[in-house]
Amino acid sequence: MNQAEIDDVLPELAPFVHAVQGRRPDDGTWCEGWTVRDVLVHQTGNAEELARVLHAFHAGSPVETRGFEREAPFRRMSDAELWAAFRDRCERLAEVTADAAQGLAPDTEVTWTGRTVTVPFFAEHMREELILHRWDLTGDDRTALQALNAPWMTEHSVVSVGRPLLERGRTTLDLGSEGRIEGRLRTPGTDDVVVTADAGGTSIRLAPPEGPATIESDPAARVLLLWGRRPADPSRWHSSAGPGALLRLRSLLAGY
């Protein structure tokens, strides 16, 4: 597969690569506890696992999704080896997703991390990871804001990844048997993102605007908040919900 074909499947790959190349491996990032090298390890593991699961399904021998232990071999690599592995795994993912797009119906259900997703999810999820983790490196530059503002980023975050995104935050909250949190994240002119959590679990959905919003923001800031990030400029989001409700919602939105 040539580079143009890879870029067609993963258009966000080149901007991510450029951002990584412009930094030292031990530079810090906006992702708490991770350096640039840690982000690259994570992305290499993502690309490998997405390709492995989809290829196995397409071949008729489905496999379980591995957890983040899949990153261990890449952490042991030298920087040069890691860089080569990242490029190799992204190329492999592009090939596998292109083949699956030709051989499987788009609505074919594939098991991924204990839930079912459809075939387009695999390329789309890697694209979202490239956008989000590029922001972890660069912050709010023009490329990051344009990518985060795209409507599909909100839809993918809510529909394809939403419930796992909330689970980490729910476990940190003392909701008890009767406690419940509900929050509305609003971007004018679009559906609200409605999140809830109680002792029984979490939910996240898109819904028409109704009543007051817990947080109102631009679409890029809303995606960052859903993933547990904080826009560099806090004036990009607004709230009249009060400190208690706001803090509970921000705690629920802990991300991965």
Image: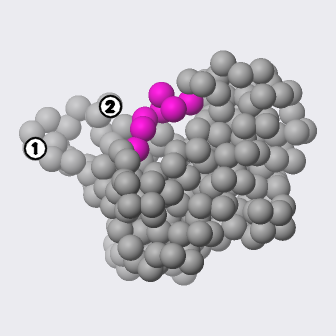
Dot 2 corresponds to which residue? 172
Q: Nearer the viewer, residue 143 or 196?
A: 143
103 horizontally vs 176: left or right: right
Pinpoint residue 172: horizontal percent, then vertical percent: 32, 31
Stretch in magenta: 65-71
Q: Quadrant of the N terminus?
A: bottom right
70 is within the stretch colored magenta: yes
- Label 1 amino acid? Glu
> Does residue 197 lie above or below 79 as drawn?
below
- Residue at 30%, 40% in the rendered image: 170
Q: CA distance from mark 2 to mark 1?
A: 16 Å
Note whether residue 162 is visible.
no
Which residue in the structure is indicated by mark 1? 178
* Residue 64, placed above or below residue 11: above
Residue 77 seen by the camera? yes
Residue ID at (9%, 39%): 177
The reply to whether the C-beta atoms of the residues labelled 2 and 1 are less than 8 Å apart is no
Q: Which mark is residue 26?
A: none
Q: Percent from the top left, x then y, of residue 238?
A: 55, 57
Amino acid under disc 2: Thr
Q: Judge from the rendering whether residue 236 lies leftward or rightward of residue 13; answer left or right.
A: left
Q: Going 45% across and 63% down the picture, which residue do you hit?
A: 58
For the residue carrying disc 1, how many other residues have a C-alpha within 10 Å: few (<14), some (14-19), or many (20+)?
few
**Residue 103 spot, x, y in % from top left:** 51, 76
